[in-house]
Amino acid sequence: MADLPKQPLVSPTANQPALLALRERIDSVDRELLALLNRRAGLALEVGEIKKHEGSVVFRPEREAQVIDGLKALNPGPLKSDSVAPIWREIMSACRALETPTRVAFLGPAGTFSEEAALGFFGSSIVRVPCASFDEVFRATAAGAADFGVVPVENSTEGVVARSLDLFLSTPLFIIGETSLIVRHNLLRRDNQLAGINAVCAHPQALAQCHGWLSHQLPDVERRPVSSNAEGARLASLDPQLAAIASTRAASEFGLHVVAPAIQDDAHNRTRFAVVTHPDRHPAPRPSGHDCTSLVVSVNNKPGAVHDLLMPLKEHGVSMTRFESRPARSGQWEYYFYIDIEGHPDEPRVGTALRALREACAFFKVLGTYPIDAH
């Protein structure tokens, strides 16, 4: 005789009363949360009125970093601490928007990783200012068309983003924050197949980060550099013979299929972004307890010059976390050095080390001091 199908030990309807009761409790908690969020928003408006009277800025990155760090430290669970930061960034973004809209420039169009970085740092309650190039991001922010700009400065696979670093030398903008993203590149196309692709469009950095996959899967296909990955996605949405390398956000934005997901050569591919603004419109952040100071310097071309450059940091116990060189384009084989150090200039040992470092340099510029990204 055939085995009869096993019956569930508990009828699916047996748990309905308990489930309905839990849902009612969740609805009740949601109403409490909404009331508390509006209460917080009211307090934020009061703070905003005091700031207006004092002439203070609305956005204080060090204050927001301290709030999030404190909440993560107090978090009893089961909510994961990593989930606390994005939740509270959105809450603070919504409260900030009640005081004044925050305009943020980034490399556009919509769907770029730069846009994703901007939303991750400021929250979604911002006025988005997409720009056609890194130069335009700096220009819009310097001119006041945007309050802040977000630009990539370093990638874990390809190293520094040279154009962003060069622009720090020619503009007055300085860094007030940083954020980083795990970057997953996807091959996007109108047709959900690899066959028939004539060219792959993407930003040069993305093409380089996917070099191995492209060489193996599409060895004879043209690699076409464009201003941004989202621009590549836009072009691919217009031409069935084009593919793009971009984010899933760009795929949704332009109605494309993800033909091949996560095609970057490094599974842990990460890009670091700097948040910049004009010093006349925003003061440098005060110490948060977990800060980074970025510099660009140059030294006279003489034996031991770079050694002398680094000695003040060693003597005063200041850790250097990044050291990059860029040609000065003077034709004399001279270089600018981009340096990140741990700490804030208001800390005595850091301030003393920076003063000694300045004396050893032919050129010295602080690019910014800001809370370290916790990602």
Image (cartoon, helix red, strand yellow):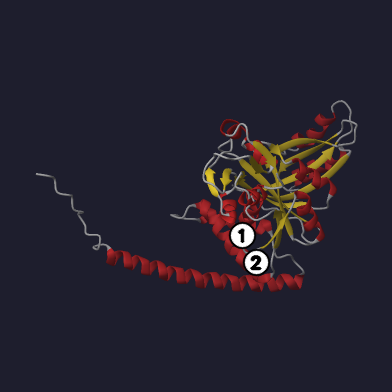
For the view shown, which residue lies furthest in the top direction?
303
Q: Which of 304/224 is in front? A: 224
Q: Name the amino acid type tagged 2.
A: Arg
Q: Quadrant of residue 268?
A: top right
Q: Residue at x 75, y 66 (%)?
A: 56
Q: CA distance from mark 1 to mark 2?
A: 10 Å
Q: Residues within 10 Å of mark 1 (few under 14, many from 20)?
A: many
Q: Residue at x 51, y 73 (%)?
A: 35
Vertical placement of residue 184 versus 86, above or below: above
Q: Position of residue 157 (x, y in %)?
A: 64, 36
* Number of disc labels: 2
Residue 50 visible in the shown view: yes
Q: Where residue 123 is drawn, which disc sits there?
A: 1
Asked if residue 224 lies left or right of residue 20, the reply is right
Q: Position of residue 349 (x, y in %)?
A: 75, 43
For the view shown, which residue lies furthest in the left direction?
1
Q: Position of residue 233 (x, y in %)?
A: 63, 49
Numbered disc 1: secondary structure: loop
Q: Residue at x 69, y 40 (%)?
A: 224
Vertical placement of residue 332 versus 10, above or below: above
Q: Quadrant of residue 312?
A: top right
Mark 1 and mark 2 in contact? Answer it, CB < 8 Å.
yes
Residue on which disc 2 sits: 96
Q: Name the amino acid type tagged 1.
A: Gly
Q: Position of residue 264 (x, y in %)?
A: 58, 38
Q: Which of 308/260 is in front? A: 260
Numbered disc 2: secondary structure: helix
Q: Residues within 10 Å of mark 2 (few under 14, many from 20)?
A: many
Residue 278 visible in the shown view: no
Q: Where residue 88 is drawn, which disc sits there?
A: none
Q: Quadrant of residue 280?
A: bottom right
Q: Earlier in the sequence, mark 1 or mark 2?
A: 2
